């Protein structure tokens, strides 16, 4: 188990201390011993092709770059699990990238075109029983406006956790992001939700 963690900014740690001739398995072995420079070297070596792979699946450069950072942080955490006998480091990283990209795309089919949060906001404001229940329609409208104050990522975790009943770990797996990221986004979403209703003098 690694004694040290790594953050996204540390993925690109300068690699001058590593010989340029280091093989991929050697870099992963260094990562398993907590060498962040090895992680940065592996990133510089394979990031362009892996980002292209993720972009082909997700269709968005920004989304692909965001996912790629998570893939390398996941590789950092699981470096001790890598076995050269089961395949090359490239295959190991490419499989993770492809799998996480597909999971993220499947987690929100409409997000690629209109955005996950926007589709949910539309659902809230046009639900079948809205016209029959003015009070509920009003509640939906207040909730829609509250959700509009959040970022798409914040709305995403809120919907998955509170509307679909997924646990924090399940959300992290569904979105292929670190558990801490899910917790941070959830806290931010709930804070904005609370502040909105406090400002409007109502409770959600």
Image: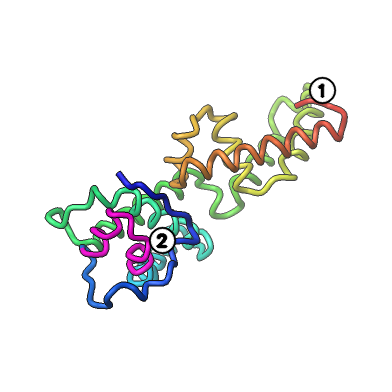
Q: Residue furthest left?
A: 85
How many residues crowd mark 2 within 10 Å: few (<14), some (14–19), many (20+)?
A: many
Quadrant containing the N terminus in the rendered view: top left
- Where residue 192 appears, as percent x and y from the top left, is 73, 39
- Front label number (1 vs 2): 2
Q: Which badge, 1 or 2, comes first in the chain's sequence?
A: 2
Relative height, residue 162 to residue 55 (above, below): above
C-alpha span from label 1 to label 2: 44 Å
- Where residue 186 appears, as percent x and y from the top left, is 60, 38
Position of residue 197 in the picture relative to residue 190 (left or right): right
Residue range in magenta is 26-42
User: What type of secondary structure mainly makes up the magenta span?
Assistant: helix
Q: Residue at x 23, y 77 (%)?
A: 21
Label of residue 54 in the image: 2
- Where residue 57 appears, as percent x and y from the top left, is 41, 59
Residue 49 is a magenta residue: no
Mark 1 = which residue?
A: 135
Most foreground residue, 170 or 23: 23
């Amino acid at each position: 188990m690694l004694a040290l963690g790594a953050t996204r900014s540390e993925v690109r740690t300068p690699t001058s201390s590593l010989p340029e001739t280091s093989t991929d398995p050697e870099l992963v072995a260094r990562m398993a011993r907590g060498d962040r420079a090895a992680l940065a070297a592996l990133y510089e070596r394979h990031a362009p092709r892996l980002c292209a792979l993720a972009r082909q699946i997700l269709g968005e450069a920004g989304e692909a770059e965001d996912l790629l950072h998570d893939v390398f942080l996941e590789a950092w955490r699981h470096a001790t699990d890598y076995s050269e006998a089961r395949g090359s480091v490239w295959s190991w990283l490419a499989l993770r990238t492809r799998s996480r990209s597909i999971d993220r795309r499947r987690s929100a089919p409409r997000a690629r075109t209109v955005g996950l949060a926007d589709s949910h906001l539309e659902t809230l404001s046009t639900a079948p029983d809205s016209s029959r229940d003015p009070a509920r329609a009003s509640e939906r409208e207040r909730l829609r406006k509250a959700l509009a104050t959040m970022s798409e990522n914040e709305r995403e975790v809120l919907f998955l956790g509170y509307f679909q009943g997924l646990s924090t770990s399940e959300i992290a797996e569904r979105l292929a992001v670190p558990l801490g990221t899910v917790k941070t986004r959830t806290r931010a979403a709930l804070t904005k939700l609370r502040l909105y209703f406090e400002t409007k003098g109502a409770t959600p």
